[in-house]
């Protein structure tokens, strides 16, 4: 079975083609045949394509940002030139899409139908930079591969069993009834890391209390119990919770009222400030990239130091609150760009969690750990670094759904 996965964000789109042998019914074994990234944001009117397969990397810059044209070009590299891995597009059995917001209707991977597409469109106001891009991806596939079945895998789904007491905001109840509640995001990544952790520990996921830290440009934590997320730091939108690269995370909502009334800023201005000019970038006034912050901090830049310290402060507080939601912790898991690569962030975070008995092995932490326990022997909880694999997890979800149909 060949599954194409599309993971569309606001300014880029990752695509991967996976092969899963048809004869293996118990657990899917994924082979990545081809991967590609389209960057829409580098230059006005131009898309930047990078394709990787057969051990080579090919780059192109089509002079258009028309999604259909660019995707057509991109998918042509599956069958033509040095990157070809297929005879024709007809070999693609299914296309899986990461969909950021599924509201409370969609709690499982779902076949894409007109009804599902209109629900995703209706939810666009809750995820304005993602859901429309996800939908466009589906429409493009409908045009280019009209015979191919498509599956939507939702980033909110893993959080759908968060208990009502944690999902509801303490606002007048009517707003909860209108859908203003905690949804949570990065669910595909949190679920993948939780499953990997259970495998590494050789224990059933159902028996584990886990805190997974997805620390990328966007960042969120999940408290996982009985194999489900029971609490998470992101909320109604991906703006709540941790301090991030350019997003503020949780702030006093009174600040927004103040900016509206006293600074006469418009909702769009405030949106821009909270999503694009805050977080590490806002405090450092230099960069939203943790690598730059760490480098500048080491050179003695005070604002970079403040941005770093504040990031760790918010992260540690939020981890402790997730542990409180669980009532216990078996493992703390780091993933995504910062979580997988920044030994300094992991060390600073775990050092501050010593009071809970969480202790890191500094040597293991520095040794570029992957799928590895880096806790000290006498730590109360294990500490894992797990490279996230959202696209692979989407392919697995599509495979599982397809197995049900064919049974
Ligand atoms: P996204 O949320 O866009 O998927 P990623 O998970 O790829 O992002 O994370 C990207 C971020 O990871 C970068 O902005 C950078 O801050 C951080 N990052 C990547 N490598 C390192 C590193 N070696 N040290 C610190 N931070 C890193």
Image: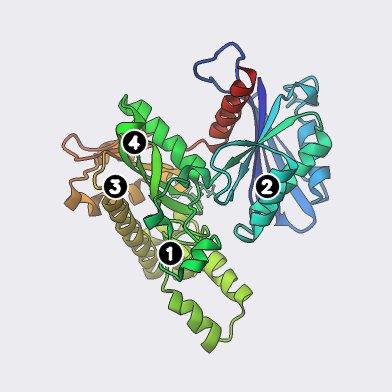
- Residue under the point 77% across and 43% down: 139
Q: In this view, does 165 lie to the left or right of 80?
A: left
Mark 2 or mark 3, which is nearer the start of the sequence? Answer: 2
| Residue 17, percent from left and from top | 66, 28
Mark 3 surroundings within 10 Å by alpha-carbon count, few (fewer than 14), some (14 through 19), many (20 or more): some
Residue bearing mark 3: 326
The quarter of the rendered structure image containing the N terminus is top right
Mark 3 or mark 1, which is nearer the start of the sequence? Answer: 1
- Residue under the point 36% across and 67% down: 306
Mark 1 or mark 4, which is nearer the start of the sequence? Answer: 1
- Residue 11 seen in the current view: no
Residue bearing mark 1: 169
Q: Distance between the residues labelled 2 and 4?
A: 37 Å
Q: In which quarter of the image is residue 271?
A: bottom right
Asked whether mark 4 and ligand 1 are closer than 8 Å, the reply comes as no
Mark 4 surroundings within 10 Å by alpha-carbon count, few (fewer than 14), some (14 through 19), many (20 or more): few
Name the front one of labels 3 and 2.
3
Labelled disc at residue 66: none
Q: How far apart are marks 3 and 4 (CA)?
A: 30 Å
| Residue 93, percent from left and from top | 71, 24
Q: In this view, does 383 lie to the left or right of 354?
A: right
Residue bearing mark 2: 134
- Residue 117 seen in the current view: yes
Labelled disc at residue 367: 4
């Amino acid at each position: 079975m060949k599954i194409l996965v599309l993971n569309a964000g606001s300014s880029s789109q990752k695509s991967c083609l996976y092969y899963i042998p048809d004869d293996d019914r118990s657990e899917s074994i994924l082979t990545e045949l081809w991967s590609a990234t389209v960057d829409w944001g580098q230059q006005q009117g131009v898309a930047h394509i990078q394709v990787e397969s057969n051990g080579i990397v090919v780059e192109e810059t089509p002079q258009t940002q028309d999604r259909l044209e660019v995707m057509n070009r991109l998918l042509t590299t599956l069958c033509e030139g040095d990157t070809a891995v297929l005879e024709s597009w007809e070999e693609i059995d299914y296309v899986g899409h990461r969909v950021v917001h599924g509201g409370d209707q969609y709690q499982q991977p779902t076949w894409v139908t007109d009804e599902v597409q209109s629900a995703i469109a209706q939810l666009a106001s809750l995820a304005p930079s993602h859901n429309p891009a996800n939908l466009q991806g589906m429409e493009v596939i409908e045009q280019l591969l009209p015979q191919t079945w498509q599956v939507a895998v939702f980033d909110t789904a893993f959080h759908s069993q968060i208990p009502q007491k944690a999902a509801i905001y303490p606002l007048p109840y009517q707003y909860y009834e209108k859908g203003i509640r905690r949804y949570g995001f990065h669910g595909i990544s949190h679920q993948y890391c939780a499953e990997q952790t259970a495998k590494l520990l050789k224990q059933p996921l159902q028996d584990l209390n886990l805190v997974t830290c997805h620390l990328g440009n966007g960042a969120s934590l999940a408290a996982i119990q009985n194999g489900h997320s029971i609490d998470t730091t992101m909320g109604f939108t991906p703006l709540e919770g941790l301090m991030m690269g350019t997003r503020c995370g949780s702030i006093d909502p009174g600040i927004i009222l103040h900016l509206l009334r006293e600074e006469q800023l418009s909702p769009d201005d405030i949106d821009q400030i909270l999503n694009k000019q805050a977080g590490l970038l806002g405090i450092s006034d230099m960069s939203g990239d943790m690598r730059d912050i760490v480098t500048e901090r080491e050179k003695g830049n005070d604002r970079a130091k403040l941005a770093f310290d504040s990031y760790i402060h918010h992260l540690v507080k939020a981890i402790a609150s997730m542990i409180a939601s669980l009532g216990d912790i078996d493992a703390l898991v780091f993933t995504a760009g910062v979580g997988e690569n920044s030994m300094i962030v992991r060390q600073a975070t775990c050092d501050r969690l010593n009071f809970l008995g969480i202790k890191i092995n500094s040597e293991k932490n520095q040794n570029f750990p992957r799928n590895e326990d880096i806790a000290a022997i006498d730590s109360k909880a294990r500490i894992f670094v797990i490279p996230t694999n959202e696209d692979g997890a989407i392919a697995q979800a599509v495979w599982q759904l397809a197995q049900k149909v064919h049974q």
